[in-house]
Image (cartoon, rainbow, N blue to C red):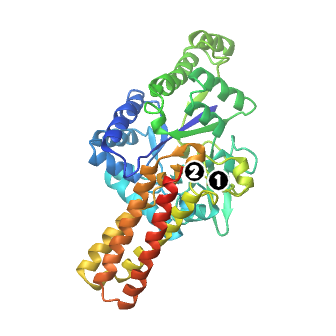
Amino acid sequence: MVYWVPFLHFYQPSIQFHSVLKKIFSESYRPLLEVYLRRPEAKATINVSGVLTDLLDEHGGSDIIEGMTKLAKNSQIEFVESAKYHTILPLISPKEAKRQLKLNHKTNENFFGRFYRPKGAFPPEMCYSARVARILASAGYNWVLVSGIANQDIWPMDFISRVKLGGQAINVLYRDDIISNKISFRNLDSIGFINELRELTKDKKNAYVITAMDAETFGHHIKGWEDKFLARTYDIIKGMRDIRDKYSRGQPERISAACRKEFKGLKEFFDIKVATISELFKKFPIKNSKLPRPSSWSTTNQDISKKKFYPLWLDEDNICHRFQWEHLKEACRFVYAAEKIKGSNKQSKRFAVIARISLDKALFSCQFWWANKETGRWDINLINKGLILQEEAILNSLMAINYSSAGDIKKAFQERITACRRIAANLRDAMLAV
C-alpha cells in the first residue's frame, strides 16, 4: 500500500488588496473546495493562516470558511497549526513565535470551532530550526512538517522520524521537494505523478509520500490545475481501487491490464490510498532520527553550505534585508516599552494596544521575500507596506509612552525615534537604488 499525503497551504497577507483577494477566492479557493466536496473519498492536510481566515470573513469569503468546516466535519481535511501573520519563526524571538502560534489558534478556533484541533504544525515557508521545534513541542504539538532538504538521515518512507530536543521530542514529517516542485511547476500530469509514486516506492511493502504546495497553485497560479491535476489524480486513484474491487484479488494481471486500458499511460496497477498526516501514525512505526537541518522550502544545499538557511528572508549580503530587520528590532523595542507602561492611564493603554496589533502584522514574511532584487522577487510596494506597519507600531508606542508618567522612558525613546527614521530612510533609499 502506498499512501499519498497532499498538503495545501492557504495564506494571504493582511495588506493584500480586496481585488486580489476576490480573484484568488474565485479562481483558487472555491474551485479547490468543490474538488473535495464532490469527492467524499478525497482528503488533504491543510494550513489556513489565521490572517487569511480573518480576510475571508471580512472580504466576502465566509462560504469558504463554511466549506472548510464541512470538509473537516466529514474528516476529509486535517487542520494544521501555524503563525497567524505568516512570520518566519526562526528569525523572531521565542516570545513572538509563541504569540503568533497562540493568535493563530485563537483565530481559527473562533471560525472553525470544535473542528479546529491541530495535532501538528507548519512553520511558514517551512522555515525550520531546532528552537522552533522545541517551541512546538512545548506547546503540545505532536509533529512538524518540514522541507525534504532538511533531512540528514535515511529518507523516511516506511517509518516516521522522531527527533530528540534535550528533554523533549517531536515527530518530523518531510515534504518530497522534487515531486512537489514538479507538480507546482506543471512538470507532471496525473498519470506521470502516479507512475512516479510507484517507481519511488516499488521496493517498499508499505510507504508514504508527502507533497506540499501553496493552495493558490491550483487555479490562481496555474489556471484549471485544480481540475487537470488534483481532481484528475483523485479520480484515477478511486478508479484504480474500483477496478481492483471489480476483479478478484487473485487476478493481478487482469487488474493491471484493466487499469492500463482505462488510464492511458499508467504503467501498472498498485494499491494507493490518500491520507492525512495524522493518519500515517496509525500505519507506520516511529524511529529516532538525526535532527533536521535549518532550512526552508526555498533553501538549496549551496545556501546551507554558506549557512544562509533562510536566504529569501534574511541574507546578510542583501542591504534591504539588513535595514528591514534593523528597523523591525527597533519596532519591537518600542512596543515592549509601551506594553510595560500601558496600564498607567487609558490613553496610554489605547495606543499600546494599537502598537501591538501593528507589530503583529508587521512580522509578515512577504516584505522580506519581495526584497530580493537579484532573484527577480522584487516589489517596492510590499516592502514599503511592511515598513509602514513597523512605523505605525513605533508611532503608537511612542504615543503610549508620551501619555504615560514614565519620564525617563519618554526621554530615551524620543531620542531613539531619530535612529528609527534614519533606518527607514536608508531602506527607502536602498529600495529606490537602481
Crowd tier of the residue under label 2, counting other residues whose Cα lies within 10 Å: few below 14, some 14–19, many 20 or above? many
Q: Earlier in the sequence, mark 2 or mark 1?
A: 2
Q: Position of residue 322 (x, y in %)?
A: 57, 63
Callout 2, which amino acid? Answer: Met
Question: Is 221 left or right of 175, judged from the image as shown?
Answer: left
Secondary structure at numbered mark 2: helix
Going 76% across and 31% down the picture, which residue do you hit? Answer: 203
**Is residue 7 in view from this perspective?**
no
Residue 247 lies, with reference to residue 197, above or below; the image says above
Q: Are marks 2 and 1 in contact (CB under 8 Å)?
A: yes
Residue where numbered disc 1 is placed: 295
Look at the image and tell me in which quarter the N terminus lies. top right
Callout 1, which amino acid? Answer: Ser
Residue 366 lies, with reference to residue 234, above or below; the image says below
Question: Is 186 left or right of 250, judged from the image as shown?
Answer: left
Secondary structure at numbered mark 1: loop
**Is residue 53 in view from this perspective?**
yes
Going 44% across and 79% down the picture, which residue do you hit? Answer: 416
Residue where numbered disc 2 is placed: 126
**Distance from the alpha carbon under mark 2 to that under mark 1:** 7 Å
Going 40% across and 42% down the picture, which residue do you hit? Answer: 72
Residue 133 lies, with reference to residue 25, above or below; the image says below
Q: Position of residue 182 (x, y in %)?
A: 61, 31
Q: Nearer the viewer, residue 154 or 258?
A: 154
Q: Position of residue 289 (x, y in %)?
A: 72, 54
The tag on residue 18 is none
